[in-house]
Amino acid sequence: MWELSAHYLWWILALLLIAGEVLLPGYFMLWIGLAAAAMGVVLWAVPTLGLLAQAVLFALLAFAFCVGYARWLRPRLERRAPGDERLNRRGEQMIGQRYVLVEPIVNGRGKARVGDGQWLVSGPDLPLGSTVEVVAVEGTTLQVRAAV
């Protein structure tokens, strides 16, 4: 029969792990697959490496690749443009914005026109038509102060 070099076995394992990543995405098997591919390169360069040394080196490489992804690559891939951290929190996007009161603030409660709707506001008593600035959000109520 024919004999397969050990470095080819590492490359086959790498392909299987990366294929598993494609089927079950999660970015975990990809890095272990890359470690297996690196082991194939190491074994191609140093074909006399023993089985125990291969196993230890593979474990170290897999750990290094996973940690490298988690600590170095992932934070760079997840960089967000300023303001994106509030993308799906509409109320927080309103902080610092100015709106006009459509109901006066009486006893700390009123309403302001926001786009084509109205939002509940709380803050100091102010007359109808006053311009207010949003300083915080509590649930669906905007905390406001008189705009300067």
Image (tube, grey):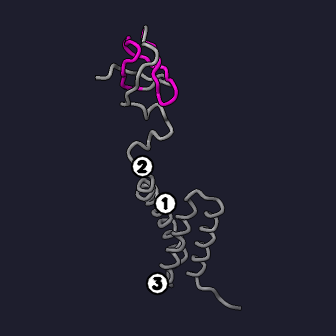
Q: Residue at x 49, y 35 (%)?
A: 89
Q: Earlier in the sequence, mark 3 or mark 1?
A: 3
Instruction: Judge from the rendering whether residue 146 lies leftward or rightward of residue 11; answer left or right.
Output: left
Q: Position of 4 compared to 49: left or right?
A: right
> Could you tell me residue 68's position as x and y percent?
43, 60
Q: What residue is at 62 percent from the left and 64 percent from the top?
A: 22
* Image position, residue 84 (x, y; %): 44, 44
Tell me if residue 142 is in the magenta stretch.
Answer: no
As helix, strand or loop, the secondary structure at mark 3 comes to helix
The percent position of residue 129, horizontal first and vertical second, equals 39, 17
Other-residue count near label 1 (Cα within 10 Å), few / some / many at <14 / 14–19 / ≥20 = many
Residue position marked by numbered label 1 in the rendering: 66
- Amino acid, disc 2: Arg
Q: Which mark is residue 80?
A: 2
Classed neighbour count for the residue bearing mark 3: other residues with Cα under 10 Å, few (<14), some (14–19), many (≥20)? few
Q: Which residue is mark 3?
A: 45
Question: Is 126 included in the stretch rendered in magenta?
Answer: yes
Give the quadrant of residue 135.
Answer: top left
Callout 2 touching callout 3 (CB < 8 Å): no
